Amino acid sequence: MTGTRDHTHIVSGDAGIKNAAEVASGLREALQGHKAVTVDTQTLTAADITTVQTLIAARVSALAKGKTLTLAAPLGEPLRAVLADAGLFSPAQTYRDFWPHSSDQP
């Protein structure tokens, strides 16, 4: 059953390729139990492009189910660095609106 309250899901530690299945599973569980999930990445110690793909896939899945998945600001530094390095803060990027904006982002 889906809860009515918003939920904050914390993704911490290494969220890279070695832990992608665990990160995806945690996001799925959070979305199963809640209509709106905010993902807090501030305690990440590592992220890579797999982390980005996992977050986008979770967001697409949430939207398909009439739910919302957002990211808390500020982003964890490892995730922010991956997004910046990959050029994903660019206004031309499809998911640009998904990434929280801060004054230090391009």
Image (spheres, helix red, strand yellow):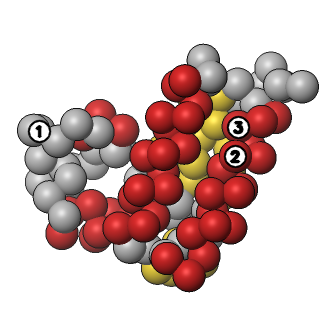
Residue at 60%, 17% in the rendered image? 66
Relative to 81, residue 104 above or below: above
Any part of residue 70 in sight? no
Number of the front mark, 1 or 2 = 2
Residue at 43%, 46% in the rendered image? 56
User: Looking at the rendering, in which quadrant would you find the N terminus?
Assistant: top right
Label placed on residue 28: 2
SS for dot 1:
loop
**Image spot of residue 83 (x, y percent):** 27, 61
**Image spot of residue 33 (x, y percent):** 81, 34
Q: Inspect the image, locate mark 3, and give the three-letter code of the amino acid beneath it.
A: Leu
Instruction: Determine whether, in the image, residue 101 is placed left or right of residue 33.
Output: left
Q: Earlier in the sequence, mark 1 or mark 3?
A: 3
User: Looking at the rendering, in which quadrant would you find the C terminus?
Assistant: bottom left
Residue wearing tag 1: 91
* Foreground pick, 74 / 67: 67
- Near mark 1 (Cα within 10 A), the count class, few <14, some 14-19 or many ≥20, is few
Relative to 14, residue 26 above or below: above
Which image quadrant is residue 20 in? bottom right
Label placed on residue 31: 3
Q: Earlier in the sequence, mark 1 or mark 2?
A: 2
* Foreground pick, 54 / 89: 54
Any part of residue 31 in sight? yes
Measured in 3D between alpha carbons, the distance from the residue under mark 3 to the one under mark 2, in whole angstroms, is 5 Å
Measured in 3D between alpha carbons, the distance from the residue under mark 1 to the one under mark 2, in whole angstroms, is 28 Å
* Foreground pick, 49 / 78: 49
SS for dot 3:
helix
Q: Are marks 3 and 2 in contact (CB under 8 Å)?
A: yes
Q: Inspect the image, locate mark 1, and give the three-letter code of the amino acid beneath it.
A: Pro
Relative to 43, residue 6 above or below: above
Q: Inspect the image, locate mark 2, and give the three-letter code of the amino acid beneath it.
A: Arg
- Near mark 2 (Cα within 10 A), the count class, few <14, some 14-19 or many ≥20, is some
